[in-house]
C-alpha cells in the first residue's frame, strides 16, 4: 500500500492565547493522487479538545486517512474513507493539535 501526504498545516494562529495553528486551505493534488481533492483544512479548538478539520472527495478509487500530530507526541488518525467526507481528528484533552495532513493510497 502506498501512502502519499497531500496536505498539512503548521502552527500559526493564536486562539484564546494558545498557539494552536492554522493555515490556508490546501488543494490536494500531488502526482499520483489527482483523484483526491481536499479543502477547508484548519486546526481548531472546541473549548475542550484541539482538532484538525478537512473535507476531501475522490473521483477515482482512492482510500484516504486524516491525521493530526498532537503536542504530547501522539499522532491520531481517522479513516479509511473512499468517498467525500468532512472529518475532524481530535487530540487528547489538554493537548494541542500541531499539524494536520491527509494520506492516501490508490
Image (cartoon, rainbow, N blue to C red):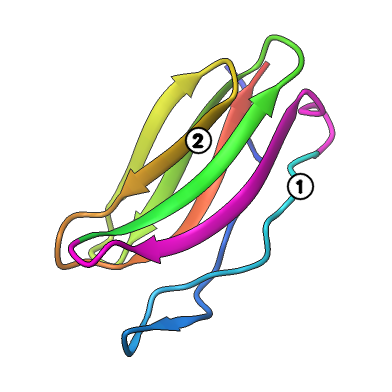
Q: Which residue is mark 1?
A: 27
**Is 25 one of the magenta-colored residues?**
no
Q: Residue at x 35, y 55 (%)?
A: 51
Task: Please tell me which residue lies in front, 83 or 63.
Answer: 83
**The residue tagged with tag 2: helix, strand or loop?**
strand
Q: Is residue 78 left or right of residue 81?
A: left
On the image, the x and y values in percent for residue 20 come to 39, 74
Q: Is residue 48 left or right of residue 6?
A: left
Q: Looking at the figure, which quarter contains the N terminus?
A: top right
- Marks 2 and 1, how far apart in space? 15 Å
Q: Mark on residue 72? A: none
Q: Residue at x 82, y 28 (%)?
A: 34
On the image, the x and y values in percent for residue 73 come to 28, 60
User: Comparing marks 2 and 1, which lies closer to the viewer?
Assistant: 2
**Is 40 one of the magenta-colored residues?**
yes
> Count the marks: how many?
2
> Where 16 sits versus 31, above or below?
below
**The residue tagged with tag 1: helix, strand or loop?**
loop
Task: Please tell me which residue lies in front, 77 or 81.
Answer: 81
- Judged from this view, the residue extending furthest toward the top is 61
Task: Please tell me which residue lies in front, 76 or 59.
Answer: 59
Q: Residue at x 28, y 62 (%)?
A: 46
> Where 61 sits versus 84, above or below?
above
Q: Which residue is mark 2?
A: 86
Q: Which residues are magenta?
A: 30-48
- Judged from this view, the residue extending furthest toward the bottom is 17
Amino acid at each position: 500500500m502506498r501512502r502519499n501526504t497531500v496536505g498539512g498545516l503548521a502552527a500559526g494562529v493564536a486562539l484564546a492565547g494558545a498557539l494552536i495553528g492554522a493555515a490556508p486551505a490546501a488543494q490536494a493534488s500531488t502526482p499520483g493522487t489527482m483523484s483526491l481533492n481536499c479543502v477547508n483544512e484548519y486546526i481548531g479548538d472546541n473549548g475542550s479538545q484541539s482538532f484538525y478539520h478537512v473535507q476531501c472527495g475522490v473521483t477515482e478509487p482512492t482510500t484516504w486517512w486524516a491525521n493530526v500530530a498532537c503536542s504530547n507526541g501522539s499522532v491520531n488518525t481517522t479513516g479509511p474513507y473512499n468517498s467525500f467526507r468532512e472529518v475532524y481528528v481530535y487530540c487528547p484533552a489538554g493537548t494541542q493539535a500541531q499539524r494536520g495532513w491527509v494520506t492516501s493510497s490508490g
